[in-house]
């Protein structure tokens, strides 16, 4: 079964015959680099390895690796899980690259040994001109079948080259890159295999028609506010104190959702959504209860996050964005043409539209679970450069839960069968496709939680 891989180690990802190998670095990054990590062979996670103590090759509970049922998610250095993201239109080469910000250049491939022969006599120093990972390459590389990989998430300092890009493109495996702080920074996408000129034309026509664009933008916001209300309702029923304040917030968000039907443009809808989220976030301390006593939270701050809860929201939103992007890649939709968010350069804004719908279900409820069960503690964060960020231990804990969250299933009301949360995202993208092809017959309504 295909699954995502989360790389927390430093090193070089390469092709070796018809497999993927991670050539590990022996040392963690210098303090000025983006991500520490001491590496673990990919094969350990391909067979189902999970969280474990240092030096132990089994999951944290001691179970043997291999079955999907027994699969926990994050290991100390790398996690194999399930998840996804998307491709970009217009790439003629075998791999298409997209950066969120133009703040770094790719590593050169000159000077590396051949991919079939990596050894200790090729050191890699942090801060050197060639940009290789800190520490020396160990020469140890354990392969795993590329057929097992659905996508790869790089939280460590990972080198790639053109041969690997072509190999991943052939097998439709995207790469996602995150910086030290867990912020999404870049994507490497396979050459598109689901292209539709007819659908692209329909997307653009809906964007250029102000009425059609507004209708789609309104659907995204109404679904988002409905899901926020559901999250509040879910936790309000479990409160012993402050329940009245939460009910007041629910009522206010319901009023704002009704006003969305009167908004005259996407900017007004974004303003309503922002007002609803401010009311929502003000109730988080009450929803978290005693477990959240060590997590101060007064307002939403992003660049940089000002406290641990803001750091959790930012990290979770980055993961949600990449999941929505991956699911869009399974359709013929162009992820750069959006309706609620203004299309722009260097971002896939349609994934932002879709993420608004699913952040309450995927991100917010994950945060509540991790904090209320004390899996995430205040010491999982660090202060750096005027902001608060998750440490590597916290990121791994979050990714562990995130994978479980994506694979959680519900009985779908319309389909009459169990559907994973991850699959819900793709189904919503398919609904958007149907709307664009025939808006009168099959109008889009964003996914709304019913439980």
Image: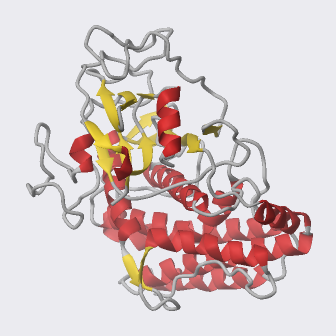
Q: Residue at x 77, y 73 (%)?
A: 436
Q: Residue at x 76, y 43 (%)?
A: 345
The front one of 302 and 25 is 25
Q: Which quadrant of the structure image shows residue 241?
A: bottom left
Could you say which is closer to the camera, residue 112 or residue 9?
A: 112
Whether residue 334 is situated above or below residue 21 in the rendered picture: below
- Going by the image, does 36 lie left or right of 270? left
x, y percent for residue 31: 39, 22
Image coords of residue 138 (percent x, y): 24, 19
Q: Where the C terminus falls, by quadrant?
A: bottom left
Residue reaching furthest to the front: 17
Numbered label tally: 0
Q: Quadrant of residue 35?
A: top left
User: Relative to 281, is 76 above or below?
Assistant: above
When the figure is inspected, residue 251 is found, relative to residue 279, above or below; the finding is below
Where residue 332 sits: x, y (%)? Answer: 67, 62
Say which residue appears at 74% left-offset and 83% top-offset. Answer: 443
Q: Is residue 405 left or right of residue 165?
A: left
Residue 368 visible in the snapshot: no
Q: Could you tell me if residue 25 is visible in this image? A: yes
Q: Residue at x 58, y 44 (%)?
A: 189
Quadrant where the image shows the N terminus: bottom left
Q: Residue 446, how many percent across, how many down?
A: 64, 77
Say which quarter of the image contains residue 426. bottom right
How is the model colour-coded?
A: secondary structure
Toward the viewer: 191 or 262?
Answer: 191
């Amino acid at each position: 079964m295909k699954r995502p891989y989360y790389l927390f180690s430093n090193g070089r990802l390469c092709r070796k015959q018809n497999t993927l190998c991670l050539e590990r670095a022996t040392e963690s990054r210098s303090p000025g680099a983006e991500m520490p990590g001491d590496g673990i062979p990919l094969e350990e996670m391909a067979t189902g390895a999970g969280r474990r103590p240092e030096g132990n090759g089994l999951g944290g509970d001691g179970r043997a690796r291999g079955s999907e049922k027994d699969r926990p998610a994050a290991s100390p250095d790398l996690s194999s899980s399930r998840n996804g993201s998307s491709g970009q239109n217009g790439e003629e080469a075998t791999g298409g690259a997209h950066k969120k910000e133009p703040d770094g250049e790719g590593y050169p491939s000159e000077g590396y040994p051949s991919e079939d022969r990596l050894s200790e006599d090729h050191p890699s120093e942090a801060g050197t001109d060639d940009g290789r990972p800190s520490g020396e390459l160990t020469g140890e590389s354990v392969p795993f079948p590329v057929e097992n990989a659905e996508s790869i998430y790089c939280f460590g300092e990972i080198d790639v080259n053109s041969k690997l890009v072509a190999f991943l493109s052939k097998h439709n495996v995207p790469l996602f890159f995150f910086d030290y702080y867990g912020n999404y920074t870049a994507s490497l996408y396979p050459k598109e295999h689901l292209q539709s000129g007819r659908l692209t034309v329909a997307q653009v026509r809906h964007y250029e028609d102000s009425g059609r664009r507004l209708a789609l933008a309104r659907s995204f916001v109404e679904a988002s506010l409905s899901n926020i209300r559901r999250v509040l309702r879910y936790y309000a029923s479990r409160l012993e104190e402050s329940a009245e304040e939460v009910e007041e917030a629910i009522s206010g968000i319901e009023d704002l959702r009704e006003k969305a039907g009167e908004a005259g443009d996407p900017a007004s809808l974004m303003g309503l959504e922002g007002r609803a989220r401010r009311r929502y976030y003000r109730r988080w301390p009450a929803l978290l209860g005693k477990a959240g006593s060590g997590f101060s939270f007064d307002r939403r701050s992003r660049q940089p996050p000002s406290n641990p809860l803001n750091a959790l929201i930012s990290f979770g939103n980055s993961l949600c964005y990449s999941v929505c992007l991956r699911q869009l890649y399974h359709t013929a939709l162009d992820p750069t043409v959006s309706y609620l968010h203004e299309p722009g350069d260097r971002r896939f804004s349609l994934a932002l539209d879709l993420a608004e719908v699913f952040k309450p279900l995927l991100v917010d409820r994950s945060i509540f679970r991790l904090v209320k069960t004390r899996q995430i503690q205040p010491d999982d964060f660090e202060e750096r450069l005027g902001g608060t960020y998750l440490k590597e231990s916290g990121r791994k804990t979050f990714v562990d839960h995130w994978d479980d969250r994506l694979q959680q299933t519900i009985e779908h009301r319309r389909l009459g069968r169990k559907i994973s949360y991850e699959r819900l995202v793709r189904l919503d993208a398919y609904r958007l496709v149907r709307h664009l092809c025939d808006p009168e017959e099959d109008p889009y309504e964003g996914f709304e939680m019913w439980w």
